[in-house]
Amino acid sequence: MKADKILFNGVVYPMNGHRSEAVAVLGDEILAVGSNRELESLCDSNTMRIDLQGRTILPGFNDTHVHLVGYGSAFDAVDLNEANSISEMIQRCKDFLKEHPRKPGQWLYGRGWNQNLFEEDGQRFPTREDLDQIQEGLPVLLLRVCGHIGLASTKALEHVDVIAQTFIPGGEFDLGTDGKPNGIIREAALEWFKKNIKSNTGLDEIKQAILTGSEVLLANGITSVHTEDSYDLGYGGSFEDIHQAYQELIEEKKLPIRIYQKISLPKQEDIKSFLATGRRTGDGDDWYRIGPVKQWCDGTMGARTAALLEEYSDDPGNLGILVYPEEELYENVKLAHNSDMQMCLHAIGDRALETALNAYERVLEEFPKEHRHRIVHCQVGNLEQYKRLARLGLNINIQPLSTAVDYPIMNARLGEKREKEAHNWRTLTDLGVLITASSDVPVEDPNVFYGVHAVVNRCNIDGDPQGGWLPEQGITVEEALMEYTINPAIAAFEEHRKGTLVAGKLADLVILDKDPFRTPKEELKEIKVLATMVGGEFNYEKVTR
């Protein structure tokens, strides 16, 4: 049996404790990994030979928490990232409309604003009155950088029939001094609001968003994603539409990356409706597989909606927003667990984490079996909670770049004692908790080596803070890369197909310009992806071979 392709003269890290020189590919799988001499016997006149010229190969990266449809859609929306004032936000929207005028009834969407940057505005949230300055009578929805808070214009609120009495459990429509909704929408209320926009997003638009987002991810060496797609911008989400869009791309042989599909099912009746379709975690193939049920237990630190056991140090009386009462969350977890569905709970604050742990613990004690249930984010907690995570066999999905981005606000939000137990990746790793890494795009940058740099050095790409934030919580380069390769495969029950470069696994790999194991740790952020192979084909190439 001869190889279709041989990549030789490289530095190959299969992520199984060994190092090699060459990789042989046959079809969409790895045929062999070894020395140049060992793999020479697998070549014939039809084998494509690719001289790596000393470049480094790793398994393709697996980003375990993205919003791919929302990410792709964001390229057709107003970019509000790094806007330093409300007036700059408004001006960006006006400038966008000059280039992309809206038709009557068409919405304007944007995301990325962060009130913590609005120094001249006293770090206040914008309101509908601010958005009404963009264009009279225009329905506008602008999402905060975290995606958990939205701003709606007066016309947008009217379109969805939001009034002072509108109430959604686990969410809030803030009221102004006049007693009317002021345009600030929080947590579960935001998801309800987006669904009730009744977006007319078509399959072609969803497919284009998938392709647009995938193109950027491939350029960052990402060959697989765990994605929850009914989340961002104005698309409130229909899982059937999303599922059909992916299936059509597969049939058309256009889907360029592999999908592990998270499904947002916020209520028990939603879970039951999904179960009635007969689909279960693991169904599918190497290109598209059904993943876990996704639910949100709280919000975010930046928005002060993460649910805390003790009040925010910089907002006395505020404990954040806890979306589910304990009994309701327990019933949801039990239903998913006993129906052969993996469960995935968003928990950022320690009160949300406690609620999630309690639900998982009750269910696993009553109905023990292999589960691989997970918690997304797990940013604020304490040692006892982290020990429970390990004992229960839960895996956690972190966003390495959040460590670099969030550190400036953590002391103010939590105070010194609680801050020291936040983003404790070293502690959790030592406890044996399986950790996977992600970008949460469009929340953070999908650059994997920005993420590796952040969790190894505990600082941002500018080197701040000097010496690192809680530097004792830094992890090794190998541990960081495991969070993007081996660990995600295990978290998705796919370790037999992904995560390491060994014979019989998928030929998903990335070629780098530098060896991350030999690069000074301060320079990890500078490593570039030169090519990305998915299923034996180069779906991204920065350099011409």
Image: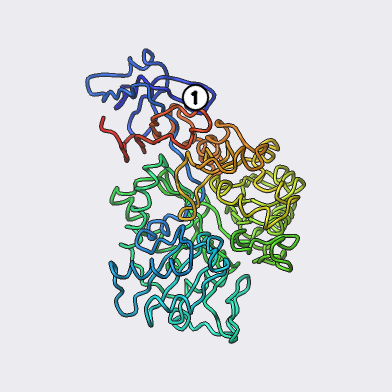
* Scheme of colours in the image: rainbow
Q: Residues within 10 Å of mark 1 (few under 14, many from 20)?
A: few
What percent of the width, then of the height, locates residue 297?
A: 63, 61
Residue pictured at 53% horizontal, 31% vertical? 521
Q: Amino acid at mark 1?
A: Arg
Is residue 449 found left or right of 530 in the rendered image?
right
What percent of the width, then of the height, locates residue 438?
A: 51, 46
Closer-to-camera residue (464/305):
464
Q: Residue furthest left?
A: 45
Q: Quadrant of residue 209?
A: bottom left
What percent of the width, then of the height, locates residue 414?
A: 70, 56
Q: Residue furthest bottom?
A: 178
What percent of the width, then of the height, locates residue 114?
A: 52, 62
- Element type at marker 1? loop
Quadrant for the C terminus in the image: top left
Residue pictured at 49% horizontal, 84% vertical? 161
As drawn, 533 above or below 21: below
Quadrant for the N terminus in the image: top left
Q: Residue furthest front?
A: 120
| Number of numbered labels in the structure image | 1
Q: Which residue is mark 1?
A: 518
Q: Quadrant of residue 339?
A: bottom right
Residue pictured at 54% horizontal, 85% vertical? 163
Residue pictured at 42% horizontal, 19% vertical? 34
Closer-to-camera residue (438/283):
438
Is residue 315 found left or right of 260 in the rendered image?
right
